[in-house]
Amino acid sequence: MYNDLNWSPAEKKIARRAYDAALQAALAKVMAEFKRRANAAATPTEMWEVGDYLRQQGKEIDELFDYRYSQLPLVFARLIREGLLDETLLAGLSEDKRRIIRSILSFAAK
Amino acid sequence: MYNDLNWSPAEKKIARRAYDAALQAALAKVMAEFKRRANAAATPTEMWEVGDYLRQQGKEIDELFDYRYSQLPLVFARLIREGLLDETLLAGLSEDKRRIIRSILSFAAK
């Protein structure tokens, strides 16, 4: 998708740190909701629904977290949009990359 | 499997009651273990494992609980063996049926 972008070693380090922080945030969010639902489950149906919730969240995280450099601008835009990534963590990426991320975000906001 | 057995209305009532009691026992057992594991889960890996546990238990319950009359003797033998059914709940079933169930149990115990 964005195969023509060039990632310097310093940018790769920044990208990895931002990505990992977002993954931790995503997992913490699912964990909190999982604990809440598991604790509240009072019937077998509610218990099986916790399993469905975990399966769905696992799938979404698998789909969202894709560390190919060609995908990262899109991934970062999605993570910012879902509140899992603070854009300031991307400071240090080249201006062209940050512009691409912002343009995806403003396109998605329309 | 046991298609030649004849179930009277009274026996069907006994069978249904025993089956339902065993299903409640199975679900209560899974629920207790689910709550224990969910409460103890401290890492994402442990959280996903709770989902795996639920999926596996759901599958086992689906496979085990089969209310076709042709399957009931085998189902009851398995439920007794797994401690989910008290054999006294089968009092009132014909002697041929109880003998079949006991023979399956003693065969499985060897």
Image (cartoon, coloured by chain):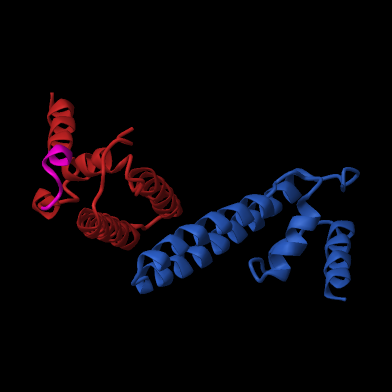
Chain colours: A blue, B red
* Of A77 and A44, the residue lying toward us: A44
Q: Residue at x 41, y 66 (%)?
A: A45
A94 left or right, relative to B110: right
Residue in view at x 79 percent, y 57 percent:
A74
Asked if one can make out residue A13 in the rendered structure from this viewpoint, the answer is yes
Q: Vertical placement of B106 versus B56: above or below?
A: above
* Towards the viewer: B48 or A5: B48
Confirm whether the magenta stretch covers residue A75.
no
User: Foreground: B105 or B59?
Assistant: B105
Residue span colored magenta: B92-98
Quadrant in the picture for the N terminus of chain B: top left
Observer-nearest of A51 and A45: A45
Residue B93 located within the stretch drawn in magenta: yes
Examine the rendering and report whether any part of residue A87 can be seen. Answer: no
Q: Is residue B39 above or below residue A58?
A: below
Tell me the residue at 11%/41% (across/down). Answer: B95
Q: Is residue A87 left or right of residue A105?
A: left
Q: Where residue A109 sits: x, y (%)?
A: 83, 75
Q: Image quarter for residue A81? A: bottom right
Tell me if residue A36 comes above or below residue A59 in the rendering. Answer: below
Residue B98, horizontal then vertical, whole percent: 13, 41
Q: Position of residue A39 (x, y in %)?
A: 35, 71
Residue A64 is drawn in which quadrant?
bottom right
Q: Quadrant of the C terminus of chain B?
A: top left
Percent position (x, y) of residue A16? Answer: 66, 50
